[in-house]
Amino acid sequence: MSGLFITLEGIDGAGKSSHIDWLEQQFVQQGRQVVRTREPGGTPVAEQLRQLVLNEDMSDLSELLLVFAARDDHLKKVILPSLAAGKVVLCDRFTDSTIAYQGYGRGVSLNVIQQFKDLIQKGLEPDITFVFDIDPMIANERMAASRTHKDRFEQEALDFFNKVRHGFIKQSQTSARYCLIDSSQSMDVIRQQLWQKVVSL
Ligand code: TMP
């Protein structure tokens, strides 16, 4: 059985997490081996880099370099071996987050991001990328209700999230691997859309 690489994207508070749980259950029921992971993170080194990126003040370029350093480690130690072993990799965020947050949000050159992407991914792309779309104002209300501590990104102003959201939407128009999901829909409708995309592969 061939490996399947699925990424889930969206602004903070878009509600990805509960859908990852559900997707994992679906694949396990089908007898597939699932690796559930996240970015930045997924290996001891990348998790340490995550702590820095989420909590320490740094330049936009440092932020970019650290997320790619974390991704390189994660790809080599977890993602590529899991795909080679025929597993389903469910990854909470990947390079589309870099394009949306560091590119559209922070204003780092998309060209520079593309060069790092090429260097590290060597042409590897997810098979499916679900982009959970939500109005940043609603996402902010959701986060206010559920988060006691906000990280560097979650503390950003609405304007930042509007730019990041725009980035995700633009990205989702560039390839058939994307599936843009309106997060304001009911859980059942969203699940139907997720599975429809999976079986369409
Ligand atoms: P999350 O795991 O709670 O979604 O938080 C991760 C945060 O890191 C989120 O605010 C988005 C941000 N991020 C980037 O800015 N660039 C990246 O490349 C990735 C993977 C995440």
Image (spheres, helix red, strand yellow):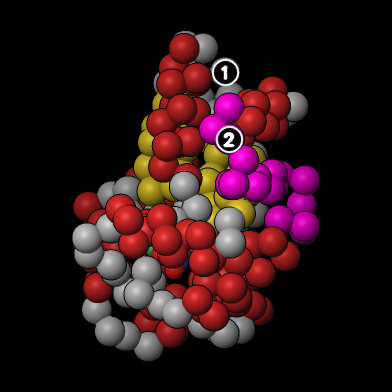
Quadrant containing ligand 1 reads bottom left
User: Is 198 above or below relative to 160?
Assistant: above
Q: Earlier in the sequence, mark 1 or mark 2?
A: 1
- Range shown magenta: 172-188
| Image quadrant in which you'd find residue 165 | bottom right
Q: Name the amino acid, label 1.
A: Met
Q: Could you give the CA–CA distance between mark 1 and mark 2, rounded to whole angstroms? A: 33 Å
Residue 170 shown in magenta = no
Q: Is residue 133 or residue 198 the one in the foreground?
A: 133
Q: Quadrant of the N terminus?
A: top right
| Label 1: few (<14), some (14–19) or many (≥20) C-alpha neighbours in 10 Å | few
Can residue 49 be seen in the rendering of this structure? no
Residue drawn at x 57%, y 85% is 107
In what element is the residue under mark 1? loop
User: Is 160 above or below relative to 94?
Assistant: below
Q: Is residue 99 left or right of residue 22?
A: right
Percent across and percent down for residue 70 are: 36, 61
Residue that badge 2 annotates: 186
| Image quadrant in which you'd find residue 36 | top left
| Image quadrant in which you'd find residue 110 | bottom right
Percent across and percent down for residue 73 are: 36, 56
User: Is 44 above or below relative to 61?
Assistant: above
Residue drawn at x 42%, y 37% is 18
Q: Name the amino acid, label 2.
A: Ser
Residue drawn at x 48%, y 59% is 139
- Mark number displayed over residue 1: 1
Q: Quadrant of the C terminus?
A: top right
